[in-house]
Image (cartoon, rainbow, N blue to C red):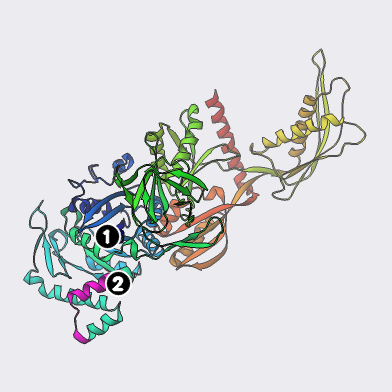
């Protein structure tokens, strides 16, 4: 019986670019299947699948929502994924948990890079696809344009299963080319009715059905031979060919309709359970044995040892942590001990939960392919493997997402500083594409993510979930200072106050070290001109002087400091007097050693379409970048080079504009270089202005 149950499981994602109506389609599918009593609307904040307050506010899906429905004795888990670029890391993670996907397309053919990206990820995960062209009643709606994009841009062979009845505002239904029945809406607010194909459409529909037969026949040699001999395929052969072609990923069935009017929605439900595979049809999943490192695998069978992959975490300060995973083998059962093989810790399941929008429903067990959740696991994080300790396995983690933009986070209240860091780190548990840290030099809290909108939504969640308000600012560039010459100077501190005085006298030489050499202190005192016990105090004074810089107040690095002479007083000398003397001496020497400012240089890799290479290289040159190479990478070109950090702090939106959203980049720190002289004055003024503002604020 368990095997039969497995054949009836589908875990399906609604994927595609933003603003094509994925959430509305999800609402329509749930309503048509009787899973919800009424169809919610994104515009008025009543959508079952957009329940986060930030989603209601922005009217955009910001995270993946799940719900399940029953259709023709099949159990379907529906995942409504984000489609805007800033939130695609969430979609990428969820694709790992699916058995198939519905690619929702715009009816006007304006395919965007987000659709390209999610389609590529679906191919990487070997997910069969169905395409649904939504909003066919819109102006300029044209099924042919959408199918052309599917074939040319996404590289998918299309098989059109629906023929539209009417165009744009006159669109009122579809003809199902398999059943040769029409499904039309006669008036506003009415549900679709099934009728015979209208006589005036017979020639168009016959031609469309022939095109469908040809597309299906080309995916199978036996069907192609039959089609060439007979000139047509039977409905049974056509259906089997569509199922085979979809599951083997050699073609994509294309359906169309209007989700809010339920046109094409029941046909899509039929296609989901008919064309897309069950978990039983997937091969065994490979992983590593954590004890031996050997490759092991688990078949998608309820009889196999339990294993599951955690692809999403939701953290609520009141309810606690919800761990969402796909069962890959065996059964997930509540109130049992499980093993987190990624972290080598034991966990205990409470009730196993099915996700119903913002609600959860306890279930007795979950089979392979099902997406479920458990609450309050202590150690488990996104990307972890859960399994039976007697048969351990670790599955590959999620792909890393390189943050593309960073902001300095400044709490509105000083008392909230520690709370802000703790709360932001809790948000990273549910959003691995976020990065939170503190810059060692500037001491700023840095928040990095997939884009400005992404960071702004995180700030909204921070306030709602943890009652912490922060201000976003451009991060400070961690400049440093150094010297280009060698110099010697005296540092003498003498003070008489009536009692015991203060006396320390040092002679110091400074000279540059190689870039990255840091700091070196050399004691060359001979003959006891400075007693040995005061030498550490001199070094301490020198180190403190270097931290404050000389030109713009930035730490001074790559300097060798030599203490070579001095004098002391038997009564008035002390550690404090020599600390001050060391500080004065090194400052006096630095003034004569050609001090300058260093800026951080980043290695950069920019991946763009070939037609954008010239524009991007020109832009990098204008940012004082140096291009060191261009090479082909997966149909795109990768530009490698170096560029100053100050020039790429806000690079993400500029690259997006230059490449129409089709470019990506990653940066990492490389080294420090001397700041060009014409920019030094600007950096000095900015530093002085920042210090002035800080002094006023502290007062």
Which quarter of the picture shows residue 20?
bottom left
Residue at 56%, 30% in the rendered image: 692
Percent position (x, y) of residue 590?
A: 74, 39
| 694 shown above or below 207 | above
- Would you call the spot at circle 1 few (<14 residues within 10 Å), some (14-19), or many (20 or more)? some
The region drawn magenta spans 229-246
Label at residue 8: 1
| 660 shown above or below 683 | below
- Would you call the spot at circle 2 few (<14 residues within 10 Å), some (14-19), or many (20 or more)? many
Callout in the foreground (2, 1): 1
Secondary structure under tag 1 reads: loop
| In the image, residue 574 lies in the stretch drawn in magenta | no
Label at residue 59: none
Say if residue 608 shows up in the picture: yes
- Nearest the eye: 444 or 69: 69
**Residue 450 in the figure: left or right of residue 233:** right
**Residue 182 in the figure: left or right of residue 369:** left
**Residue 391 in the figure: left or right of residue 300:** right
**What secondary structure is the magenta-colored segment mainly?**
helix
- Nearest the eye: 155 or 371: 371
* Residue that protrudes farthest toward the right in the picture: 527
| In the image, residue 241 lies in the stretch drawn in magenta | yes
Label at residue 245: 2
Secondary structure under tag 2 reads: helix
Percent position (x, y) of residue 77?
A: 29, 53
């Amino acid at each position: 019986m368990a095997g039969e149950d497995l054949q009836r499981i589908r875990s399906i994602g609604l994927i595609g670019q933003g603003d094509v109506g994925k959430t509305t389609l999800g609402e329509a599918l749930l309503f048509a299947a009787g899973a919800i009593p009424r169809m919610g609307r994104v515009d008025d904040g009543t959508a079952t699948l957009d329940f986060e307050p930030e989603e209601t506010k922005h009217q955009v899906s910001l995270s993946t929502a799940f719900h399940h429905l029953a259709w023709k004795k099949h159990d379907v888990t529906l995942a409504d994924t984000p489609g805007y670029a800033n939130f695609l890391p969430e979609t990428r993670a969820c694709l790992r948990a699916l058995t198939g996907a519905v690619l929702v397309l715009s009816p006007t053919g304006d395919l965007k890079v987000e659709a390209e990206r999610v389609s590529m990820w679906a191919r990487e995960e070997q997910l069969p696809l169905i395409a649904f062209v939504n909003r066919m009643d819109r102006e300029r709606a044209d099924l042919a344009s959408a199918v052309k994009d599917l074939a040319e841009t996404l590289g998918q062979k299309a098989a059109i299963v629906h023929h539209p009845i009417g165009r744009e505002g006159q669109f009122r239904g579809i003809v199902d080319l398999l059943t040769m029945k029409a499904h039309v809406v006669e008036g506003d607010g009415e549900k679709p009715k099934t009728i015979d194909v209208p006589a005036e459409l017979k020639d168009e529909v016959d031609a469309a059905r022939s095109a469908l037969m040809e597309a299906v026949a080309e995916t199978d040699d036996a069907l192609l031979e039959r089609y060439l001999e007979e000139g047509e395929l039977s409905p049974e052969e056509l259906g089997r060919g569509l199922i085979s072609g979809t599951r083997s990923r050699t073609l994509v069935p294309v359906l169309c309709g209007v989700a809010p009017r339920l046109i094409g929605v029941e046909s899509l439900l039929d296609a989901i359970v008919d064309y897309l595979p069950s978990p039983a049809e997937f091969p065994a999943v490979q992983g590593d044995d954590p004890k031996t490192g050997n490759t092991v695998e688990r078949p998608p069978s309820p009889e196999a040892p339990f294993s599951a992959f955690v692809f999403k975490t939701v953290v609520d300060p009141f309810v606690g942590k919800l761990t969402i995973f796909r069962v890959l083998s065996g059964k997930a059962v509540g109130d049992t001990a499980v093993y987190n093989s990624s972290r080598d810790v034991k966990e205990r399941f409470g009730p196993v939960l099915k996700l119903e929008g913002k609600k959860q429903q306890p279930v007795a067990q979950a089979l392979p392919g099902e997406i479920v959740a458990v609450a309050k696991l202590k150690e488990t994080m996104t990307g972890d493997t859960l399994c039976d300790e007697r048969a351990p396995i670790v599955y590959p983690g999620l792909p890393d997402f390189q943050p593309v933009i960073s902001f300095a986070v400044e709490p509105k209240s000083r008392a909230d500083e520690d709370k802000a860091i703790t709360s932001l780190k809790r948000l990273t548990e549910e959003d691995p594409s976020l990065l939170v840290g503190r810059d060692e030099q500037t001491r700023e809290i840095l928040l990095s993510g997939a884009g400005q909108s992404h960071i702004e939504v995180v700030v909204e969640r921070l306030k709602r979930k943890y009652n912490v308000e922060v201000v976003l600012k451009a991060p400070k560039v961690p400049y440093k200072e150094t010297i280009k010459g060698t110099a010697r100077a005296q540092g003498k501190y003498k003070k008489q106050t009536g009692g015991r005085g203060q006396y320390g006298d040092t002679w110091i030489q400074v000279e540059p070290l190689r870039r990255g050499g840091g700091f070196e202190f050399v004691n060359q005192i001979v003959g006891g001109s400075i007693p040995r016990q005061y030498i550490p105090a001199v070094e301490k004074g020198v180190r403190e002087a270097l931290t404050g810089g000389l030109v713009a107040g930035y730490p001074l690095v790559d300097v060798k400091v030599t203490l070579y002479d001095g004098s002391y007083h038997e009564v008035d000398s002390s550690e404090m007097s020599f600390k001050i003397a060391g500080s004065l001496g090194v400052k006096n020497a630095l003034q004569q050693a050609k001090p300058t400012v260093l800026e951080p240089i980043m290695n950069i890799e920019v991946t763009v379409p070939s037609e954008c290479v010239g524009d991007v290289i020109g832009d990098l040159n204008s940012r004082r970048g140096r291009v060191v190479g261009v090479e082909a990478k997966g149909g795109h070109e990768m530009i490698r080079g170096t560029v100053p950090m100050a020039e790429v702090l806000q690079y993400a939106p500029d690259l997006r504009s230059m490449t129409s959203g089709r470019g990506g980049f990653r940066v990492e720190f490389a080294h420090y270089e001397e700041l060009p002289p014409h920019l030094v004055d600007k950096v000095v003024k900015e530093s002085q202005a920042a210090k002035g503002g800080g002094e006023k604020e502290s007062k």
